Image: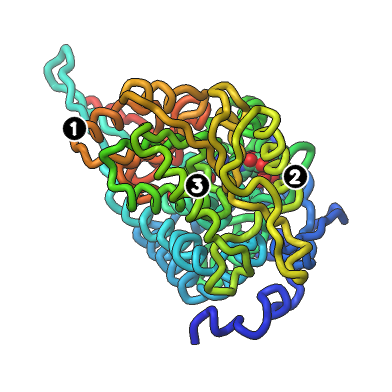
Amino acid sequence: MTIHQLYERRPLSQSSARRDAAHFIDGAFTQGTTGKSWENFHPVDGSLIGRVPEGGRAEVDAAVTAAHAALRGDWGRMSVVERTDLLGAVADEINRRFDEFLEAECLDTGKPMSLASHIDIPRGAANFKMFTDVAKTVATECFPMTTPDGAGALNYALRRPRGVIAVISPWNLPLLLMTWKVGPALALGNAVVVKPSEETPLTATLLGEAMNKVGVPRGVYNVVHGLGPNSAGELLTQHPRVNGVTFTGETRTGEAIMRQAAHGIRPVSFELGGKNPALIFADADLDKAVEGTMRSAFSNCGQVCLGTERVYVERLIFDEFVARLKQGAESLRPGRPEDPSTGIGPLVSKEHQAKVLSYYARAIEEGATVITGGGVPKVPADLAGGSWIEPTIWTGAPDNAAIVNEEIFGPCCHIRPFDTEEEAIELANSTPYGLAAAVWTENLSRAHRVASRMDVGICWVNSWFLRDLRTAFGGAKQSGIGREGGVHSLEFYTELTNICVKL
Ligand SMILES: NC(=O)C1=CN([C@@H]2O[C@H](COP(=O)(O)OP(=O)(O)OC[C@H]3O[C@@H](n4cnc5c(N)ncnc54)[C@H](O)[C@@H]3O)[C@@H](O)[C@H]2O)C=CC1
Ligand SMILES: O=C(O)/C=C/C=C(\O)C(=O)O
């Protein structure tokens, strides 16, 4: 039976029992001691999924203490092979319980199962597998040197785990983005305390069960739920015994976390916001460019930091491109995650819907022309409680408009014509962000030339979100600090100790 057949008769929100989340500290699930909690709602219809406990100082302290104990205990003593075998088993366990992870992720986010079953959950498992390979093949540098007595000396560098890593993760790709950090952290011998987004607590909690099932020692993987400021997020990133902080989310939040991590000089690794451009040249394969931009602007309801919110199209094909993207956007039918014909899910929450709608209103004030969308779609009565939004396309806004410069994080883009390659490059680089770009052209020389001038961490040519996990991933300018992925993750998750041996 396929996952869609499983849910054919009953919506996901009615087919599962109420699910309360729990902290996972030192290998055990707990509701903690604060007595505070919040309600977690299904963004599709506003139904209650369950309650989430809010962690405080006691939970954060307990989790950090457990993580240090794990580093001093069995986990710290394991060989790389033993450690990576266990993490391979975690990946297998995610795959074995694939449907449970899928259901939890779609309950929390409302995203279509067709999307999460192809991207979120498989990547959750792959993030563990990939970094076990990296950890097993880490090389080290060695510099033989001469000394005045002629005997010489040998320098070699040992890579050691950094220690206890705080992982602060967002709600748009909850399991994928959390394991993208937990995978390398653990493979390289660290222990983690995760503070998942308050919007999406379930898959991080479920991963605790997988860790216990395969025998990952207690204290290696900890989860403390809570909010950001004045709550578990701030307490964790300020905690004096946390040795490094890795974060994916909004740039302004990154600034706050950086200040918090400054106490005690803790290193940070940040993947932050974007206002990513797509450049569509007249010599592009238009079918591919339209299909790629459809995905980059609208998939996951536009809640992807790498998504395209600015599209620059060579004037010769501008009208045709706009017409075709409009047609595509209007074909996206809102629906429940379990419905295979669903083209677009809701935004993650009512709060985020209000934010995106405020930009839709701002677009009008700024003089943009609404090509399609701009509001809340009509949905069947049983979905009326959800945080739905129309895929939206604008043209004609001035280059300094907020909708052209600020990250909206919704299914929307502004399309503007350009006349020369030089102009397109200048427009693409014109925001303080520098996460990703997409260049669409069939001209090989132009592809390389333009890509090399994008001020971004990741530039796709004739594609989008094509991910090889061995590559450096991260943002330039205000879109991040550092790179993760493949051997690049070694930089943040390990400390180098140079050993100089006099011969
Ligand atoms: N570029 C990206 O990858 C993402 C961008 N966003 C954007 O950010 C906006 C705000 O959404 P949020 O969920 O609030 O994202 P956020 O970036 O504020 O939060 C992400 C994570 O950081 C935590 N956090 C917030 N403040 C903190 C603090 N002072 N110390 C420690 N942890 C803290 C949150 O609890 C959550 O786990 C969204 O409307 C969206 O536009 C949201 C998610 C991902
Ligand atoms: O593929 C990845 O590792 C990450 C993809 C998306 C994000 O980082 C994001 O939307 O925040």
CA–CA distance in space, label 3 to label 2? 19 Å
Q: Would you call the spot at circle 2 few (<14 residues within 10 Å), some (14-19), or many (20 or more)?
A: some
Quadrant in the picture for residue 412: top right
Residue that badge 1 annotates: 445
Q: Earlier in the sequence, mark 3 or mark 2?
A: 3
Q: Position of residue 351 (x, y in %)?
A: 75, 47
Vertical position of residue 251 compared to residue 336: above or below:
above
Q: Is residue 50 visible?
A: yes
Residue that badge 3 annotates: 297
Residue that badge 2 annotates: 354
Amino acid found under the numbered disc labelled 1: Ser
Locate ligand 1 by image quadrant: top right
- Element carrying mark 2: helix
For disc 2, does the CB lie below 8 Å from ligand 1?
no
Q: Residue furthest left?
A: 150
x 58%, y 74%: residue: 339
CA–CA distance in space, label 1 to label 2? 44 Å
Q: Is residue 61 visible?
A: no
Amino acid found under the numbered disc labelled 2: Ala
Q: Position of residue 241 (x, y in %)?
A: 63, 38
Q: Residue furthest top?
A: 148
